[in-house]
Image: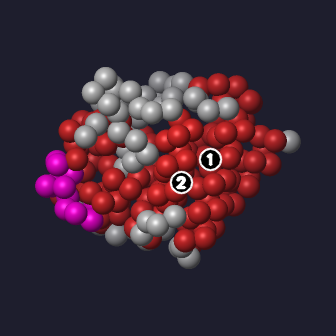
Amino acid sequence: MPTKRLADALALAIEAHTGQYRKGTTIPYIVHPLGVASIALEYHADEDQAIAGLLHDVLEDGGDYYSDIILEKFGERVHAIVEACTDGLPDENGLKSDWHSRKLEYLKSLKTVSEDVILVVSADKLHNIRSIIDDFHVMGDSVFDKFTPTKQQTLWYYRSVAEIAMKNSSLKITDVLNNTVVQMEKLVLS
């Protein structure tokens, strides 16, 4: 499937995430959008969905500046998926509202999204959870120190996303997401 559109989306994601790193690591942030797109493709994403996987954090991390660019370069469907994956835009000072309020709004919005969005959101959360599990094996509970929420809040959030995704979609990836949440819960709560 590699196409010019996919390559252009990767270039835009690299631009938007330049200088950013995964929380508490020296891993370039672009690894995450690449992982999300890869997981989405494993679960039969089409080109637009894979592009949205690459761009899913561009608005959230790069700001509203990228909104028109995404719409113009990749179309309404990709733009709509990316917008629905965004849990809050930074203000003019680069700040977002508090974590808990953003997540409650995001979870509420997930209850009415399309399967396009469920696929990309599930791939996103699956990549995040797998990273947490990998880091937990090395760092133990201190893996949660790099996040704003507590361990319990983190578990609540991922459990909530998985439940909403499973309730609102029959996509195979939602089962995989749920099973991975269960795996994380067993590991970190034992």
Q: Which mark is residue 107?
A: 2
Classify 131 as above or below 116. above
How dense is the environment of label 2, judged by Cα within 10 Å: few (below 14), some, or many (20 and up)? some
Percent of width and height locating residue 25: 52, 25
Percent of width and height locating residue 34: 39, 48
133 to the left or right of 31: right
Q: Which mark is residue 157?
A: 1
164 to the left or right of 181: left
Q: Quadrant of residue 51?
A: bottom left
Q: Residue at x 62, y 47 (%)?
A: 157
Single out the residue that lies furthest toward the bottom: 170
Q: Quadrant of residue 169?
A: bottom right
Q: Which mark is residue 75?
A: none
Percent of width and height locating residue 3: 22, 61
Q: Residue at x 68, y 47 (%)?
A: 156
Say if the magenta span includes residue 77. yes
Range of residues picked out in magenta: 68-78
Q: Earlier in the sequence, mark 2 or mark 1?
A: 2
Q: Residue at x 58, y 56 (%)?
A: 161
Instruction: Please tell me how many numbered marks the rendered image carries.
Output: 2
Say if the magenta span includes residue 181. no
